[in-house]
Every structure is written in structure tokens, then in C-alpha cells.
Amino acid sequence: MWGNDMRVAMNTAHRRQAPGEVNVLIGLIVIAIIFEALGWIQPAWRSDVAAQSFLLNKLRLSIIIGQVAITGIIAVGVTQVIITGGIDLSSGSVVGAAAMIAMSFAQASANARAVYPYLTDMPIIVPALVAVLCGALAGVVNGGLIAYTKIPPFIATLGMMVTARGIASWYTKGQPISFPTDEYTVFGSGMHPVMIFVALAALFHLVLRYTLYGRRTYAIGSNEEAARVSGINVERHLLLVYTIAGALAGIAALVLTSKNLTAQAGMGVMYELDAIAMAVIGGVSLSGGRGSIVGTVLGALIFGVITSGFTFLGIDAYYQQIIKGGIIVSAVVADVARQKRAARRA
Amino acid sequence: MSDIILETRGLTKHYGGVHALEDANFTLRAGEHIAVVGDNGAGKSTFVRQITGVEQRTAGKVWFGGDEVIFSGPIAAREAGIETVFQNLALADDLDVPSNLFLGRELIKFNLGPFSILDHKTMRERTQQALTKTAVKIPNLSSAIRNMSGGQRQCVAIARSASFASKLIIMDEPTAALGVQETAQVENIIRGLKARGVPLILVSHNLRQVFDLVDRIVVFRRGRIVASLAKHETDGNDIVSYITGVKGSEAALEKPGLT
Ligand SMILES: Nc1ncnc2c1ncn2[C@@H]1O[C@H](COP(=O)(O)OP(=O)(O)OP(=O)(O)O)[C@@H](O)[C@H]1O
Ligand SMILES: [Mg+2]
């Protein structure tokens, strides 16, 4: 009996792998070191730049974090959706729609060309709430369709992607909305976007780890049928998860418009893909049940480091797109390979 | 007070044209362990799903603990005291052992609706106790179920049903696909239930096991109950002839030339 237990114990210890986040962190460090090395030797093929450090540059580091903060906020929601086994393709368009509608409540009366002159000089709580509610409403529609009509998440959120973009254009017939009140600029100024991102990531990290909400989210993504027969109201929970993801897209819209001091119907295009990429690079499994907010934050940093690194090395924007696409596909391939290994073991 | 725990009368389930379960009359008494046997597709799992409210029956009545019951779902059945180990296990592979044991009935430290704070510590301790009580040995509680062997997973599923105080436990093929040692462990848990007087319905294809463990054997064939025999008044050959339809099938008896 004892011998058997020992064998089982050793077997399990042997099988246990480093948690996904550690691998992502190692990936982040390796990528940063590669750019650092390339920074010092790049005069070898570029005559226009001197040897320099990639990492020891405060401005660059703050740009990296600043760049990923807004899509990172979206990724916090998208991560939860993916853990349930779903997907949200609508977040970029929802950012566009929420940006337009929220901004129309944030205009200053000094702006003679206000789109809705009677909505000027509102206290900032109004546009802030409007942004979150617009996002949440889109999430309710997504979640409702997915949970109660059993439309695949891919299709339901693809529909919302088109619809929300349409609403963004229709709202002002394509006209941008600019010149918000001075107070409104608070969300996007300085390091505020980063602080909002970090606060939301920390909040949802705790929620996923320590609450019933988190337990249900993982259980549904892991085995929806098991969750259902165990007494979890799967439909109601999915509705909640998509609503939260939508609300986070709304917050991203708030920060983005506050930072750019303008809202345009084309805002947020492709943000959903960046957010999904951050999650996937961060080790969130597209088949559900696995991943974490910590992983996604690390994935977001990898994303930011790569983007900034390419610019640092003077790589053309076209190549950046192509290489980024390759990285996303590699992350998914790695996930599928992990899946297969796990299936073989079971 | 009668000592009947579970009774079904005329229990029937049709899936469109498929008559998966037809007019099942079944009785289980206090402390009794009953085996349900039959060929693949005989309707055993269908029978279990009707009792446990996983599906809604086409016709018939079910009494549990003396009251007529219609369970709206498996949760209702569980709340009434029926614990089930389903054929497909119903475990969440990415969660660890305590999370699976308490799936859907998590202990809570602080109630905030869906955002209630989980009581990880107590759930862990209770899991440890439950596993000790059922003599299940799992080396690492906080490893995901995915990383465990088929036998360990099965033991978790069984420990889950055996450890929550219940009035009836149903296991649908708990040892299918298990090794010799793991099967022995599951059988030990079942003997423990017998000793504690917890009634059991055991769906199994393993006649050796059935004769080892239970008091009475109920044979299903083509959606019907064709025999219900006390262990001491039957044997393996007898049961096999009921399973294959050599005995007990009215259709076979009625057809001229076959008698
Ligand atoms: N959801 C369903 N829809 C249609 N037919 C079904 C459904 N579930 C079961 N059946 C059919 O009902 C019959 C009985 O199936 P059931 O699963 O109860 O058999 P079983 O006795 O448990 O078999 P096994 O020993 O293989 O588990 C089979 O013919 C099966 O194909
Ligand atoms: Mg079956």
C-alpha cells in the first residue's frame, strides 16, 4: 500500500509543470534581453543610431506600459470571457460606440461647435457612468444571446462588432466629438491610464482567485456540463461575465477619449484582437478553464515590449504587423500543443 | 412507516422514437445495495437520469423517502439527499480536488452574492477529512484534476458523493476503465457505505463485482426491467441469460418456435 502511494506521489510530482505564469514571465525576460542585446549591436547594421540600452530608458518603459494600459483594460475582461470557454470580438467596436456616446456628455460649453449643445458642462461622473453603462449594455446583449439562445460566442460577438461600430458612426453621422471639459481629461492624463489598468487587473485577479464568481468562471470553462449538474446557473453566470467584459471595454473608451481629447467613430478598431493576443500570449487557454489575470498582464507587457522593441530597432510598421501576427499564431499553436499533451496524459 | 427509500412505478422515457426506458417498477429499501445490470444501451443510465432529475421523464411516478417527487434538476435531487456519480464523472478538469468536491456548494466566508469570498481553508480541511473517511489517497490536493490518473479522478468523484451526508447514492459504472487496484479502492468505499447503512444503486457491467457487493440485482433489457433477484437466489449464468434475453423476455416466450 505504502509503496503504491509513494509511486503515485512521485508520478504526480514528476508530471507537475511550472505554472503557466512563470513560463510567460521567463518569455518576457528573454524577449527584453534579446532587444537589449540588439540595442547594443545595432550600429553594426544601422549607421544612423548609436549603441544604446533598450531597458535603461525611463521614457521608453513608461511608453511601453502606457501603450498597453488601454488595451490591457479590455484584456482583463476578455481574459474572463476566454476562461469560460468563450470569445469576445466586439470589444474594439464597443470602445468606439461607448467613446462617442460618453464624449457627447463631456463637452465643454466653450466649444461653439458642440454636437449636442444642451449636454455641455456635465459633471464628469455623467460621461464616466455613460461609458461604463454603454459597455455593460453591449455585454448584456452579447451574454444574453450566448447564454440563452446558445448562439456561439464567436458569432454573437461578431454581430455586436458590426452593430456597435455602426452605432458609433450613426451617433453623430460620422462627425468626431472633441473639446471635453477640463475635468474630463483626468482619466487619461499622465500615468492615470496605467494606474486604472493596474487597479482593475488587481481587482479582478482577486475576484477570480477568491470569490464564487472566479470559481464558477473556471468551472464553466473547464467542463460546462459538470458545472451545470453541480448546481451552477451557467446561463446567469455567462451573462454576468460578458457584462463585466463589456463594462471594462466601456472604461477603456473613457480612458482613451480622455487621453486623446476626442472621440471618433473609428476608435478602437482591432483592439479586440490585441486584447485576445495579450491573453493568449499570457497563457490563457482558448479552450477555456485555464489562465489568469497575472498571465494576461505579463502577456500585455510582452506585447508592449515587442511593439516598442520593433520601433527601437527601426523595423518598418508593415513588418511589425506581420511579425505580431506570427507571434499570436505561435501562442495559439503552443496552447493547442499543451492541450494535446494534457489529453494524452488523461 | 415503511422502510422503502426509493420507488418508481411505470417510469418511462422516450427520446423521440427511441423507447430508452419503458414502464420501470423499482423498489429500494433502507440500507439496501442494488445492482443495475444490462447490455450497452439497455437503459441503465437513462433510468438513473430520470431518478436524478437530469432529464424529465415521459411518464411514471417516483417516490423518495415516502413522498412523491418530481425533481426539476440534479440540484433538486441532491438537495433531497440523492448523490450521484454520473457515468461521465462531472468533474471540472482544471480545478483542484477541494474545488471539485465542493463544486456548486462552495463554503463561503463572506456573503456578497456572486462575488462571495470563498472559504478555501475550511474546504481544504473538509476535503482532507472526506478523503480520509473514504480511505482515498490523493498525493497533492491542490493539483488540477487533469493531472491525475483515471482512478484518482474516479475516487474524487466517489468521495464527493460519499462524503456529503446523503439518503441515497447512485453510481453509474464507477469502475469502468479502472485498474485492478483502483477498482478495489472503489469497492472498499462501497463496503464502507454498506457498513454505514447508506443505500446504493450501482450500475455495473462487472458481475464478479456485483455478486461481491450488493444484495439484489435488477436486470435491464431493451429499456425494460426483466428481473429483480436477491443475490442468494441467483447466479452469474442466470443473470447473463436475463441480460441476453434467453430468459425473461416475454417477446421471446410468445414467439412461436422459440419456446
Ligand atoms: N439523449 C438521448 N437521445 C436519444 N437517444 C438516447 C439518448 N440517451 C440515450 N439514448 C438511447 O437510449 C438507449 C439507452 O441508453 P442508456 O445510456 O440508458 O444505456 P445504458 O444501459 O446506460 O448503456 P451503457 O451500458 O452503454 O452505459 C440507447 O439506445 C441510447 O442510444
Ligand atoms: Mg450507461
Image: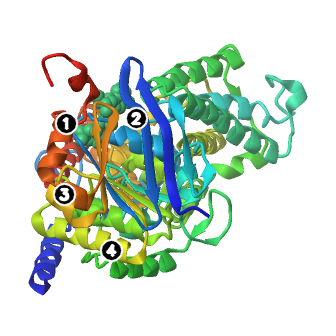
- Rounded to the nearest angstrom, the CA distance separating label 3 from label 4 is 39 Å
Question: Ligand 1 near label 3 (Cβ, under 8 Å)?
Answer: no
Please tell me whether mark 1 or mark 3 is closer to you in this view: 1
Q: Residue at x 45, y 51 (%)?
A: B27
Q: Chain of mark 4?
A: B
Question: Percent x, y for residue B162?
Answer: 40, 68
- Rounded to the nearest angstrom, the CA distance separating label 4 from label 1 is 48 Å
Nearest the eye: B219 or A291 = B219
> Label 4, on which residue?
B141
Element under disc 4: loop
Image side of residue B180 versus residue A203, left or right: left
Element under disc 2: helix
Q: Residue at x 41, y 55 (%)?
A: B84
> Label 1, on which residue?
B247
Q: Chain of mark 2?
A: A
Q: Amino acid at mark 2?
A: Leu
Q: Chain of mark 1?
A: B
Label drawn at residue A34 = 3
Q: Up-down: is B155 above or below A284? A: below
Element under disc 1: loop
Of the residues under marks 3 and 2, which one precedes in the sequence? 3
Question: Percent x, y for residue B239?
Answer: 19, 47
